[in-house]
Amino acid sequence: MSEFTRLENKVIWITGASSGLGKQLAIDAAAAGAVLVLLARNEAKLKEVQQVIQENSGQAHIYTLDISKPEDIEASVKNIVEKVQRVDILINNAGFGVFDYADRMSLADTKEMFDVNVLGLIEMTRAVLPLMKKANQGHIINVASQAAKLATPKSSVYAATKHAVLGYTNALRLELEETNIHVTAVNPGPIRTPFFDRADEDGSYVANIEKFMLDPEYVSNEILKVIEKPKREINLPKWMGFGSKLYQLMPGVVEKLAGSKLRQK
């Protein structure tokens, strides 16, 4: 029996569900009895995730959606709601990064990161909020990053997108404080997923931080815990969350003492 008893029959929507953390969340939530709505661009990979879930007696509905095209989201959500009826929990997980120096970052990559990481997340949230407000219940979980709190060289644009996600999440929480809709920010450090296939093509950053990388199973478990017991924010790992908090208090000191550690990309 799963430890996540409150997930039974909950309808959980996950963006970026075809691989990495999104895939792990889908499998783990389904094992706890949740009904999954999985969204991503790659239909073939979505079907693979769905098959894994169904082979373990879980329920998963899949829908192709390119989150980088926010103008398509409202129509897609309307179509899904007609079939699934509910959204109890929305996990805005879709996101990617490209690591490079600010003067080398292309406008195309910059625009795509903002379209996916920020505008897609905002539009997805906007599209489901009326449903949650009508039911006066729900939980929105936005996967941000430790980069939202402590930006490092070669991640200027990526960090900017995650700063935006965190700011949006914090304001949204205040807007909804008189409702039964919870809002949580998840700020993980580096996770061992295909994220780095694009973010770090030469593998140098991964080689430098391999021992600090989080397993997707661990991050998924922590997110499911916050569904069971809502919190405003979780920082993973905890020591990294402490480091970013220290940076906010004493940025100059942290940059001076840990400068080399912040330049591992």
Image (cartoon, helix red, strand yellow):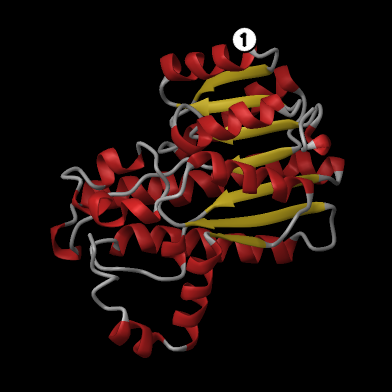
Q: Residue at x 70, y 12 (%)?
A: 57
Answer with the quarter of the image where residue 130 lies: top right
| Residue 33 falls left or right of residue 249 | right
Q: Residues within 10 Å of mark 1 (few under 14, many from 20)?
A: few
Answer with the quarter of the image where residue 37 lies: top right
In the rendered image, residue 162, in percent from the top left (x then y), is placed at 44, 59
Amino acid carrying mark 1 in the image: Glu
The vertical placement of 214 against 28, above or below, is below
In the image, 82 versus 156, the foreground residue is 156
Q: How many marks overall?
A: 1
| Residue 254 falls left or right of residue 52 | left
Q: Is residue 126 visible?
A: no
Q: Quadrant of the C terminus?
A: bottom left
In the rendered image, residue 122, in percent from the top left (x then y), is placed at 55, 49
Answer with the quarter of the image where residue 96 lies: top left
In the rendered image, residue 262, in percent from the top left (x then y), is placed at 29, 70
Label 1, secondary structure: give it. Answer: helix
In the rendered image, residue 140, in percent from the top left (x then y), is placed at 67, 48
In the image, 153 versus 261, the foreground residue is 261
Q: Residue at x 19, y 43 (%)?
A: 201
The vertical placement of 156 against 114, above or below, is below
Q: Residue at x 52, y 59 (%)?
A: 237
Q: Which residue is mark 1?
A: 55
Q: Quadrant of the N terminus?
A: top right
| Residue 22 falls left or right of residue 170 | left
Q: Is residue 131 visible?
A: yes
| Residue 61 falls left or right of residue 225 | left
In the image, 162 versus 30, the foreground residue is 30
In the image, 145 versus 203, the foreground residue is 203
Q: Residue at x 72, y 59 (%)?
A: 231
